[in-house]
Image (cartoon, rainbow, N blue to C red):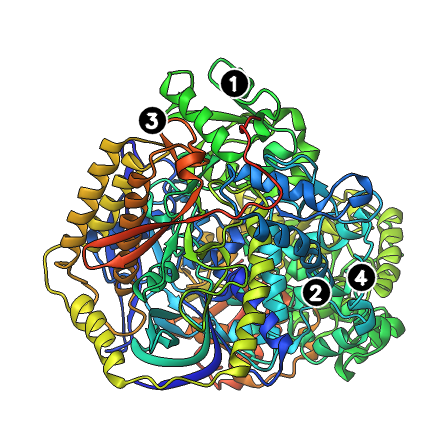
């Protein structure tokens, strides 16, 4: 590459020497031109500064999948990322997660490839048909249905970013995507055996969306997982725990197994207005099944109501007519049931006159914003962190009491990764005096899922070491955090459970931001 | 050091290697097949193939085997062996259908049949394609199929360093397990080389970093002659400045090549076929435009514009999504809005291990298929879309022939001395060398030399300069220092071994180019600008001797088509 260096960038690269078994960082200063990719930087270092730096690469055009590494915490192809686009003077490079390191940035990808042996990766058709000399007919519309799913280069980025993959039973996003790619291929006749291959582990996925987010070929693997599940639900081949959740929703319109008449039980003594007593308010507070019914999480709903009262906001809830938003149900693949819930809630949103809807759960927020039929209403919906950050900015909410704790903020997947809401929760926490806010190592888009999404909070079956929440709490403990702050009731449930399993409740507590705020006003 | 043994050992897991593994396993499930690859199979350079695979599928609509053969032979500037080409075109359709039956998502026409588009130098649209990621789809399909056979063992990230011969028979290979750094001996009844081409000896190339011609060099060192090494194809449309391939199908879909004046200059060089003339014709045209000052000039020097704007966003997104993404991410232009900056790059090596129609070499039990071999199907210039077909057709032949041989012949004993010698060459001679020369410096100097003196237009003076410089670099190589002293996954040692192979192949290429005093196909001599069928309708064979490559010549097989003037 010719041209003048635009700037010099410092590369901090994690090394691993297999002979001494030592892990350490090496720092290099690399002159960067317009167009220099991370791979170009690696080659520059190896050729000019340190011949021992070891990494994989081949095609340098984003098609072979060799060069995936973690760049400032996020997995990506080194050859397909321009250094200047990262807008950073210091770039930290580490090997991909979830795979054993062989040397420096080279990881053992065999565990990733093993998963493909558990599914069929060729077309399934009767032998006589395969021996015919003619082509199979496939119309362009049919090819379009699965073409995008065939673009996977098996780079293993999705697998390395996946929280469910810490359990080796999980086939991983790429293999599950390939499985669905064949089911969706109109030529294939292997439906039954393909579903069988994934039935026992597809439920470990939490729909955190990391796979789709980081895929360099834009393959929507998260969606393929949901499609696999959807077919399992249709054929009735689902585990008991999943059946229980779905049956509860059919019967009670919520996954918590409790009659809707008890839905306002959390608000005892708080004077919360609810439909049908009122049909109009500035703010429609959408409570969420978890904070409405879960004994521990009711504190979160109560904290929200207390803060809204303190702010003097004119708000109300839908009362017993607030049905489950359906987000978890949709990610579990039960599209029909989701539609039933959504249709009802949409009807209620149309009946109730409100300027905006504020949710406690990022899951409710996510589905109202992104999934039909909710999405078509163009609702003015906010997560509470957006609403309260606004209130703090305007000086309406004044947290005055100090909160002298070391607090690590965990970005909930459905708030952060999926909806890009990173700053507001942090703004709220930073406003509180005495609170020392620390970042988790895996932060923002690279946050590590608590393991609760897509119904896994209810269907969890894995051994402790293979549960994402245990992994995440360990990370917080290593940072010396006293509190893990979250903004999602499902994160509270899973992470708190992890502190109990690890027997560290004395050392570290899990709190929703609402609960922290309540203590400071 | 372990002694491993398999009935058939295939070196290289690209299209040809994987196809051979499948074919051998189909002959008999009692055969034990090993596939050795220095990268995981799906990382092979074959995944970079974009545009498609040629085959005659629509005879009822006017295509024919004779037409495909004629296009190939004329494209080869009449150096192709016509009996091989006739066999090749007849086997191609079956390969397309087989891939489809295994699951490959070919792009379709409105009636749901496998779609085909136009290719350079072809008189009928017969390029079968899967958008512009045909190589990716073929590789993943073949890898999936090859993985279904219990008798196929993959040795991933194992590096083959030499072929061991005993009594003019290929007895096995020496291989390094990159994970441990240990060398092992692998005995085989039959060996298939499928390691790809060697265009990485050039600085500006479409090739992956890992495609360094290892098998070609190994065969050469084992006493097998290389054929037609002077013929290197320069692809007209490689992205500036990296050299990343922009598929010929961009022109097949209707793209234009323009100079700084906005002219479709191909009208002055190939008025009939225009942008779809064969690659050597277009590459020379572009070079002339650049040399005569009519090209665009940018921050990375002169370039030609590949204009796709008139195709429209919908068609580009459907047929050419990969190159659009690459142009945007790595080239800084959106082809929907601006022409893509391109110029010719070293792209394919027509020459390689000399094999016959059965993919047999002069060494018993050694076969070669794919770009590392030279049959010759492609002669002095290859048509776009014919290489992937070549890999499939002859990958299958190699697998079948090797299987038949392995069923009839036993293992040959390998004296330990031979393996110890190779260990000494690699570990003492190269890994342990404590000189002052950097591997990367020699490598870059080699690539620069080839770029400057052995490019599209060659002269005696330039070639002689190149030869001198290469020989100096070979001397320098004896004095290298491999900084990385670790045994586990030593990529610097791999680079040194690859450079060793590349220096060898560069020397052969230049010596053959010097000797051929004519211009034919991709080999263009400014001092001998005409094609000379009287003296040069022959293949060059190069044998390794202590004094350098020794050349001899063999005739071209002509069946139906007499050489004519090559105009497009």
Q: Are marks 3 and 1 on the same chain?
A: yes
Closer to us: B497 or B29: B29
Q: Are marks 4 and 2 on the same chain?
A: no
Q: Chain of mark 4?
A: A
Q: Nearer the viewer, mark 4 or mark 1?
A: 1
Give the residue at mark 4: A187
Crowding near pointer 2: few (<14 within 10 Å), some, many (20+)? some
Q: Earlier in the sequence, mark 1 or mark 2?
A: 2
Distance from the alpha carbon under mark 3 to that under mark 2 = 48 Å
Closer to us: A357 or A303: A357
Name the outermost residue toward the front. Answer: B534
Distance from the alpha carbon under mark 1 to that under mark 2 = 43 Å
Q: Earlier in the sequence, mark 3 or mark 1?
A: 1
Name the outermost residue toward the left. Answer: B435
> Residue A336, position in %: x, y?
87, 63
Give the residue at mark 1: B265
Q: Earlier in the sequence, mark 3 or mark 2?
A: 2
Instruction: Pick the quarter of the image with the C terminus of chain A.
Output: bottom right
Give the residue at mark 2: B102
Q: Are marks 3 and 2 on the same chain?
A: yes
Distance from the alpha carbon under mark 3 to that under mark 1 = 21 Å
Q: Residue at x 30, y 40 (%)?
A: B515
Residue A438 placement: quadrant:
bottom left
Q: Are the residues at dot 1 and dot 2 in contact (C-beta closer than 8 Å)?
A: no
Q: Nearer the viewer, mark 3 or mark 1?
A: 3
Residue A196 placement: quadrant:
bottom right
Q: Are marks 4 and 1 on the same chain?
A: no
Q: Are the residues at dot 4 and dot 1 in contact (C-beta closer than 8 Å)?
A: no
Q: Chain of mark 2?
A: B
Give the residue at mark 3: B526
Q: Residue at x 51, y 76 (%)?
A: A111
């Amino acid at each position: 590459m010719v041209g003048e260096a635009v700037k010099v960038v410092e590369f901090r690269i994690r090394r691993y020497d297999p002979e001494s078994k030592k892990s350490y960082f090496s720092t290099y200063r690399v002159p960067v031109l317009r167009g220099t990719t991370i791979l170009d930087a690696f080659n520059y270092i190896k050729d000019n500064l340190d011949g021992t730096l070891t990494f994989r690469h081949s095609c340098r055009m984003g098609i072979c999948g060799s060069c995936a590494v973690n760049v400032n915490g996020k997995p990506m192809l080194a050859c397909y990322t321009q250094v200047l686009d990262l807008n950073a003077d210091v770039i930290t490079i580490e090997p991909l997660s979830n795979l054993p390191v062989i040397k420096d940035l080279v990881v053992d990808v065999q565990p990733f490839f093993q998963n493909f042996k558990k599914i069929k990766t060729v077309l399934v058709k009767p032998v006589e048909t395969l021996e015919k000399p003619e082509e199979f007919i496939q119309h362009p519309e049919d090819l379009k249905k699965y073409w995008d799913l065939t673009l996977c280069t098996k780079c293993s980025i999705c697998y390395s970013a996946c929280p469910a993959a810490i359990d080796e039973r999980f086939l991983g996003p790429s293999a599950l995507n390939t499985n669905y790619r064949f089911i969706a291929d109109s030529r294939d006749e292997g439906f039954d055996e393909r579903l069988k291959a994934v039935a026992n582990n597809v439920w470990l996925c939490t729909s955190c969306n990391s796979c789709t987010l980081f895929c360099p070929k834009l393959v929507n693997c998260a969606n393929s997982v949901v499609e696999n599940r959807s077919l399992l639900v249709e054929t009735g081949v689902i585990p008991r725990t999943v059946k229980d959740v779905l049956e509860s929703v059919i019967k009670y319109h919520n996954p918590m197994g409790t009659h809707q008449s008890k839905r306002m039980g959390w608000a005892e003594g708080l004077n919360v207005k609810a439909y049908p007593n009122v049909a109009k308010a500035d703010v429609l507070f959408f409570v969420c099944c978890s904070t409405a019914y879960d004994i521990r999480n009711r504190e979160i709903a109560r904290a929200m109501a207390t803060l809204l009262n303190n702010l003097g906001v004119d708000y109300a809830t839908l009362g017993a007519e607030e049905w489950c938003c359906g987000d978890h149900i949709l990610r579990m693949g039960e599209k029909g049931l989701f539609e039933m819930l959504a249709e009802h809630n949409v009807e209620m949103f149309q009946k109730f006159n409100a300027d905006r809807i504020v949710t406690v759960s990022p899951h409710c927020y996510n589905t109202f914003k992104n999934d039909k039929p909710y999405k078509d209403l163009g609702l003015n919906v906010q997560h509470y962190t957006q609403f309260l950050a606004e209130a703090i900015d305007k000086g309406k909410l004044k947290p005055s009491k100090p909160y002298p704790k070391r607090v690590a903020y965990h970005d909930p997947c459905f708030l952060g990764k999926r909806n890009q809401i990173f700053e507001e929760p942090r703004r709220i926490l930073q406003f509180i005096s005495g609170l020392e806010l620390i970042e988790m190592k895996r932060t923002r888009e690279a946050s590590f899922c608590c393991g609760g999404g897509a119904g896994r909070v209810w269907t969890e079956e894995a051994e402790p070491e293979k549960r994402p929440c245990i992994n995440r709490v360990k990370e917080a403990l290593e940072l010396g955090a006293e509190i893990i702050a979250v903004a999602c009731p499902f994160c509270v449930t899973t992470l708190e459970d992890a502190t109990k399993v690890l027997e560290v409740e004395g050392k570290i507590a899990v709190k929703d931001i609402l609960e922290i705020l309540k203590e400071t006003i | 050091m372990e002694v491993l043994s398999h009935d058939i050992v295939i070196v290289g897991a690209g299209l040809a290697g994987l196809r051979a593994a499948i074919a051998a396993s189909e002959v008999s499930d009692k055969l034990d097949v090993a596939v050795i690859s220095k990268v995981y199979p799906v990382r092979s350079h074959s995944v970079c193939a974009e545009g498609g695979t040629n085959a005659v599928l629509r005879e009822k609509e006017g295509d024919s085997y004779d037409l495909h053969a004629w296009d190939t032979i004329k494209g080869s500037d009449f150096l192709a062996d016509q009996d091989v080409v006739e066999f090749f075109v007849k086997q191609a359709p079956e390969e397309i259908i087989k891939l489809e039956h295994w699951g490959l998502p070919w792009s379709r026409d409105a009636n749901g049949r496998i779609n085909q588009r136009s290719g350079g130098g072809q008189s009928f649209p017969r390029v079968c394609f899967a958008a512009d990621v045909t190589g990716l789809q073929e590789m993943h399909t073949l890898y999936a199929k090859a993985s279904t056979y219990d008798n196929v063992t993959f040795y991933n990230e194992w590096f083959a360093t030499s072929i061991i011969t005993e009594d003019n028979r290929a007895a096995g290979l020496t291989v390094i397990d990159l994970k441990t750094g240990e060398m092992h001996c692998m005995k085989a009844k039959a060996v298939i080389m499928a390691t790809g081409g060697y265009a990485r000896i050039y600085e500006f190339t479409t090739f992956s970093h890992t495609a360094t011609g290892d098998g070609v060099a190994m065969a050469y060192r084992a006493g097998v002659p290389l054929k037609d090494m002077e013929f290197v194809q320069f692809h007209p449309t490689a992205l500036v400045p990296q050299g990343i391939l922009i598929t010929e199908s961009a022109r097949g879909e209707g793209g234009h090549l323009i100079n700084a004046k906005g002219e479709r200059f191909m009208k002055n060089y190939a008025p009939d076929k225009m942008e779809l003339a064969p690659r050597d014709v277009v590459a020379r045209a572009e070079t002339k435009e650049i040399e005569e000052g009519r090209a665009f000039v940018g921050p990375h020097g002169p370039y030609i514009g590949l204009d796709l704007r008139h195709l429209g966003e919908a068609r580009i997104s459907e047929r050419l999504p990969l190159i659009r993404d690459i142009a945007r991410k790595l080239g800084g232009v959106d082809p929907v809005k601006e022409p893509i900056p391109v110029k010719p790059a070293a792209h394919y090596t027509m020459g390689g291990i000399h094999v016959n129609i059965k993919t047999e070499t002069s060494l018993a039990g050694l076969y070669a298929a794919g770009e590392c071999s030279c049959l010759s199907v492609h002669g002095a210039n290859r048509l776009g879309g014919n290489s992937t077909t070549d890999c499939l057709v002859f990958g299958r032949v190699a697998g079948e022939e090797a299987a038949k041989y392995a069923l009839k012949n036993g293992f040959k004993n390998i004296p330990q001395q031979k393996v110890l010698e190779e260990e000494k060459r690699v570990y003492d001679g190269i890994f342990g060398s404590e000189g002052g020369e950097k591997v990367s410096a020699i490598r870059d100097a080699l690539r620069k030399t080839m770029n400057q003196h052995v490019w599209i237009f060659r002269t005696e003076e330039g070639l002689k300069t190149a030869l001198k410089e290469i020989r100096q670099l070979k001397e320098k190589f004896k004095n290298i220092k491999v900084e990385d002293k670790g045994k586990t996954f030593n990529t610097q040692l791999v680079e040194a071994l690859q450079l060793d192979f590349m220096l060898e192949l560069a020397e052969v290429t230049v010596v053959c180019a010097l000797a051929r005093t004519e211009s034919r196909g991709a080999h263009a001599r400014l001092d001998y600008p005409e094609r000379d069928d009287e003296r040069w309708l022959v293949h060059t064979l190069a044998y390794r001797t202590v004094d350098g490559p020794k050349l001899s010549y063999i005739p071209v097989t002509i069946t139906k088509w007499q050489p004519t003037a090559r105009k497009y």
